[in-house]
Image (tube, grey):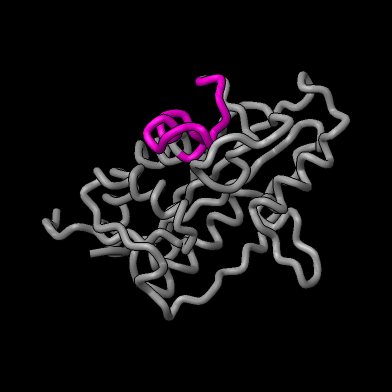
Amino acid sequence: MSNVKTTIVLATRNAGKVRELHALLEDMDCRVLGLDAFPEVGDIPETGTTFEENALIKAKTAAMLTGHIAVADDSGLAVDALHGAPGVYSARFSDRPGYPATDAANIAKLLDLLRDVPQERRTARFICAAAAATPDGMTLVRRGQWEGAIAARPRGTNGFGYDPVFVAPEYGRHAAELDAVQKNAVSHRRKAFAALREAWPEFLQTARRQGAIA
């Protein structure tokens, strides 16, 4: 086996995701780069209808355009009282003409939709699909979930996205009140990437055997 570290491209420019994913992958004896290292790769449209489809679209596109193994995730919030919404549209939940979605606007819309829903019915989960792809199209996909509930108001300044209103039952606190170590110990991304990491040696070995990577 080659002693040269395999380069993994994280198919995202979201600084929060890059930090979290790098922490989850940093001990895999690989060189981890974000898409900022590849300015020639433009935005990758997320046209899938499931988290798995979107993760694969991003990973396969980034692998093809960079020539390296690419890893991507697609994640979002599913609220039971909203029949699984915002789901794959979590990042753009509050989009409207002339007003692109922001974390604050997404949270405001979510809380407005849940304003008459009692706390016992505000169950929700973060879902993450993690995918890896080689430049020649080999793929690996795994999923993780983080069960919790939606609070009546935001708390905390850590994290991003819906973290300020997501109550983590493991700690009895909002996700945005947790530090990176606490969050990475229980999050949907940790679970998805733990499953991805478990399958990684065989995936990498197969990719090398087939000549998909050096």
| Residue drawn at the location 13% of the way across and 57% of the way down | 2
Instruction: Please provide percent x and percent y for residue 57.
Output: 55, 62
Q: Is residue 18 magenta?
A: no
Instruction: Please provide percent x and percent y for residue 134.
Output: 38, 62
- Residue 155 in the figure: left or right of residue 95: left
Q: Nearest the camera: 116 or 71?
A: 116
Magenta segment: 171-189
- Residue 199 in the figure: left or right of residue 175: left
Query: Which quadrant of the figure has residue 23?
Result: top left
Q: Main secondary structure of the magenta part?
A: helix
Instruction: Please provide percent x and percent y for residue 64.
Output: 43, 71
Q: Vertical placement of 42 versus 83: above or below? A: below
Q: Vertical placement of 148 versus 22: above or below? A: above
Q: Nearest the camera: 124 or 58?
A: 124
- Residue 105 in the figure: left or right of residue 180: right
Q: Is residue 173 magenta?
A: yes
- Residue 97 in the figure: left or right of residue 125: right
Query: Which quadrant of the figure has residue 120?
Result: top right
Q: Is residue 171 visible?
A: yes
| Residue drawn at the location 72% of the way across and 53% of the way down | 105
Image label count: 0
| Residue drawn at the location 42% of the way across and 75% of the way down | 65
Q: Is residue 139 visible?
A: no
Q: Nearest the camera: 60 or 148?
A: 148
| Residue drawn at the location 42% of the way across and 58% of the way down | 133
Q: Quadrant of the C terminus?
A: bottom left
Give the residue at the far left of this rendering: 3
Q: Nearest the camera: 163 or 92?
A: 163
Instruction: Please provide percent x and percent y for residue 153.
Output: 70, 34
Query: Which quadrant of the figure has residue 7?
Result: bottom left
